[in-house]
Image (spheres, rainbow, N blue to C red):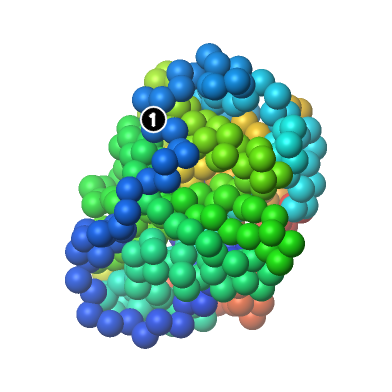
Amino acid sequence: MKRLTLPLLSVIVLLATSCGNDPQEDQFDDGQYGYNGQEPGDPGMQEGNGSMPGRSSGDERMVMYPVTDPNTGMVSQQVPLPASWKVAQGAQGNGPAITGPGGVKVYYWNGGTFTYSNDPSMQQSYQMAGQQMRQPVDIQTYVLQDVSQAMGNKGMRLMKQYPLPQVAASNQAYSSKLYKVAPTRDHFSAMGTEWTNAQGEPMFMIVNMMVSQGQSNVFWYTNMQVVTAEKGAMASAKAALVNSIVNTQYNPQQIAAYNASEQQKAGQSWSQHNARMQENQRNFDQRQAIHRSTTEAVNNSIMGSYNSRMQASDENQRGFLNYIKDENTVRDNSTGERYQVQSGADQYWMNNNQEYIPSNDVMYDPNADQNVNNQQWQEVEVEP
């Protein structure tokens, strides 16, 4: 879908992270985003060249679970899972996406979506929208500040953390195959974290982070994969979760189809943009095109390999993919048509070209906004 994305900051359901950092001078140095000088990965984790997909891993046989893209009907990827693990059908609310023997439960949680820029026009746009920018932090700092605070509110205590370079490399390898409107410098990192509650029950969480630098702004994004299990089953459950991420097999035909579609949409968007915008607005939209490309590429690359965990029916799978891709489905009540939009806003306004503006301000009306009032905008309904 074509999108006119004004820079509105997504607020993700699990970690309602604060974005109150004062904008400072932005160095945009790749070194600040990694996990430097830390100990090697947990010895209990399987490396990417460990167990072979579809074959046995220790005492547990692995099977390949095909994932179908409901928009195209093509198999997008195949994910290796232990044969005893069961993908939940019609999971609701905060229920697990996967269950298995030994009390195994697997969850997929959104973290946060953030943007920062030194560009005065970008900063002004965020201020007008009532949003705040946040500078990127390294993944260790994010775990200690944001994740630990949220988990502490749930009665969990951080016991251990260590980098998972094989997970980060897998995420980056897939992202590098996706079409982008403009060049960006992307950095991926992943951290394994171990937690326990007052009853001594263990939890393992993988924290993923992507930082993407454009010409004048930085977009960064986080999400988590979580497994809980009985103490005796936790080691194998952790290894199986990491193995399912690292050894996911992607369909090159589906990637090619996605890239062709995105390239066509980008071309159409630029054509319409050049016809209706003056030079100053054109420069602004170019920066937004970079932001748009980065957002969609990340949501597909990091979370695309996990949408096998949900229901098999088209309706349930669509809902799960919305959750995984950090999207919402909206309905145009005048036509009954449904559209996919980036999640994180309470309201969405759409024009006749299916471009949309997200907003968290109930008083905002783009028809009264001088920057976009040369066309008609209609509010669309967010489906539950």
Q: Residues within 10 Å of mark 1 (few under 14, many from 20)?
A: some
Residue at 48% across, 59% down: 160
Q: Read off the residue under disc 1.
A: 48
Which residue is painted at 75% across and 40% down in the image?
103
**Residue 318 shows in the view:** no
**Where residue 101 sits: x, y (%)?**
74, 32
Q: Is residue 153 left or right of residue 258?
A: right
Residue 184 point in image, percent of width and height: 25, 51
Q: In the image, is 329 to the left or to the right of 37?
A: right
Residue 334, placed above or below residue 241: below
Q: Judge by depth and name the residue closer to the eye, 127 or 22.
A: 22
- Viewer-proximal residue, 243 or 275? 243
Which of the 4 image quarters holds residue 137? Answer: bottom left
- Please name the residue shown 55% across and 32% down the image: 240
The residue lying at 36 percent from left, 38 percent from top is 166
Q: Secondary structure at mark 1?
A: loop
Outermost residue, bottom side: 22
Residue 319: image x %, image y %?
Answer: 70, 42
| Residue most extreme to the top | 55
| Label total for image | 1
- Tell me the kind of residue under disc 1: Gly
Q: Is residue 227 visible?
A: yes
Coordinates of residue 307 in the picture (x, y in percent): 60, 36
